Every structure is written in structure tokens, then in C-alpha cells.
Amino acid sequence: MRHLITPLDFSVGELDRLFDLADDMREHQERYAHLCDGKKLASLFYEPSTRTRLSIETAMLNLGGRTMGFSDAGSSSAAKGESVADTIRTVSCFADIAAIRHPKEGAATVAAQFSRIPVINAGDGGHQHPTQTLTDLLTIRNLKNRLSSLTIGLCGDLKFGRTVHSLVNALARYQDIRFVFISPPELRMPDYITEFLDDRGIHYEEYIRLEEVIGKLDLLYMTRVQRERFFNEEDYVRLRNFYILDAEKMSLAKNDMFVLHPLPRVNEISVEVDNDPRAAYFRQVQFGVYVRMALIATLLELV
Ligand code: NCD
């Protein structure tokens, strides 16, 4: 039985097949409308979510399956002190596949250890967010027609942002990838990620000012400052508006530099950028549904 806990759980070849399937599902959605007839997805969300939960549930519905779950830990037995291990053992009696989002790093790994059904990590604390990464890679593949030979800037909260950790892990396996990390010194990429890159001899640079480097990027991945993972509100308030991507900064970028963002956006992208043809973050949301359809079908071994 397979799970998706980190993006490295799938080889590059397996990811290629997953993205081909997602593209086919996008073009011929009707062909897959009954693939999951009779199957059930449980979504176990111990943390807030709009896109990830609704996207995973939409994916299951598009495939003809059904969904159940909770979107608030307070309404689950977690509020009574139940462990993730016991919850997933229970859910294994009800559903065919589960997606879990949890504030603790490693929660999805624990769930997978005790599960009798495939587990999808829908975000574990500040650690990893592999389905967002699948979304990001499918989006990049469609926008740029490649996942290699790219200079990608990751900007914002690189310390607590799980989406950037997963994306760097995943992209590092492709040829000729150059990472540009743009963050305030307090929110730098964690050592375990830079050591991962150092071990593999993968190029990265670190900057504080976005203006200084935006002109050489093929892609800019913006992120929100992760308020809920800060130890004190003062630091958050000081750092929350450190980066605001606006039309002026976009004028320094290449004509084919797409802007991605896992969303939700707070202030880090001015709404004036939304109408720029290079703003791709809402297209990214749409790709997320197709890639999660492909993921569910793959983990349930229906393709
Ligand atoms: C991200 C997350 O939850 O990590 N959102 C998402 O799933 N698309 C990013 C964020 O919350 O900043």
C-alpha cells in the first residue's frame, strides 16, 4: 500500500506518469467520472484549509467517489485527547483513502504507520505539503513546458512555509535547477533544506531584496508569512509586510516570468498584479484538482 507523505515518495518517472494522467483527466474529465464509484475519502483536517481540503474533496467527487470527514479538530475526538494513531485506525474501518492535515510535524508519517488505507499528507506543521508540490509541478510543467533548466525564486517565509520545503525537495531532482531564496534573515530556509541541497551539489543563492534579483527569475513563488507558527505576535507584525509584489516590481521581471503562490494571499501580492498575464496563482488552484484526481486514482490503484 502506498501513501504520499513527502514529495520524494514518488520517483521522477512516477511523477511524470502522474502528471500525464492529470493532463489527460483535465482534457477528458468525463472518461474518469466513475473511476471511484463506491469509494470513500476521509478528510481529517486539524488545521484551517480552504483550497487543499476542497480540492481533494472535489477531486474525489469528480471521480465519482464520496467524501466525509472533519474540518475542525474541535469537532473530532482529538478534542477528547484521542491520538492520531487511534483516529486513523478508526477511519481505516470507514474509508478507502484518507487525507490528513495536522499542526504537528510528522503527524502524517504516524498516521501512515497505523493506517490500513492510503494516507495523503495534506500538510504537517511547518514541515511538508506534498499535494501542493504536485500542484506546483503540474502548473510549472504546463506553463513552461519543462521541469528542468529553471531559475526559480522562492520569496517570503521560507522558514515556516511547508510548501517551499516540499517544492525544493521535489525540484532538486530535476536537471539544471537554480534556486534563489529571498527572505528576511529571520525567515531563511532551514538548515535541513540547504544541507539537502549542499549534499547534492545543487545551486542556490540567498537574497533579502526581491528587486535585486527578480529580473533573472523564470518563476517567482511567493508565500505568506506563517503567522500561526510564530512564537510572538510582535515578530509577525514586524515581518508580515516585508515583501509586497506590485506592478512596479513586476516591471523588472522577464515577460515570461510566471508568479505562483500556494494561497491564501495576505498582503504579499498586491491585487493589481492579478490582471498581469504572468500571475498564475488562480490557474495553479485549478491544476491542483486534476493532480489530486490523478493522485487518488494512483494510490487506490485504479489506473
Ligand atoms: C498553504 C499551506 O497550508 O501550507 N496553503 C495551501 O495549502 N494552499 C500555504 C499557506 O497556508 O500559506
Image: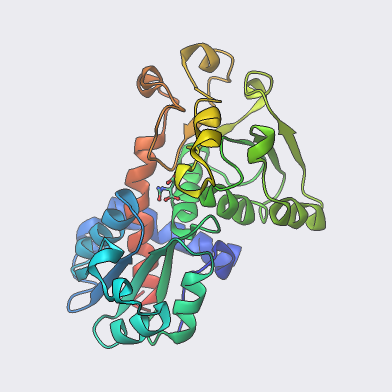
Picture quadrant of residue 131: bottom left
Residue appearing at x 66%, y 52% in the figure: 174
Judge by depth and name the residue closer to the eye, 2 or 256: 2
- Percent from the top left, x then y, of residue 87? 34, 80
**Quarter in which the C terminus is drawn:** bottom left
Picture quadrant of residue 203: top right
Residue 222 visible in the picture: no
Judge by depth and name the residue closer to the eye, 250 or 267: 267
- Percent from the top left, x then y, of residue 34? 19, 70
Residue appearing at x 32%, y 76% in the figure: 97
Picture quadrant of residue 32: bottom left
Residue 290 visible in the picture: yes
- Percent from the top left, x then y, of residue 116? 38, 87
Residue appearing at x 40%, y 77% in the figure: 84
Is 173 left, or right, of 262 in this rendering? right
Q: Is residue 106 above or below residue 159?
A: below
Is 205 left, or right, of 120 in this rendering? right
Judge by depth and name the residue closer to the eye, 260 or 240: 240
**Quarter in which the N terminus is drawn:** bottom left
Judge by depth and name the residue closer to the eye, 103 or 173: 103
Q: Is residue 39 above or below residue 44?
A: below
Q: Is residue 59 above or below residue 299?
A: above
- Percent from the top left, x then y, of residue 142? 45, 43
Residue appearing at x 53%, y 52% in the figure: 162
Model colouring: rainbow
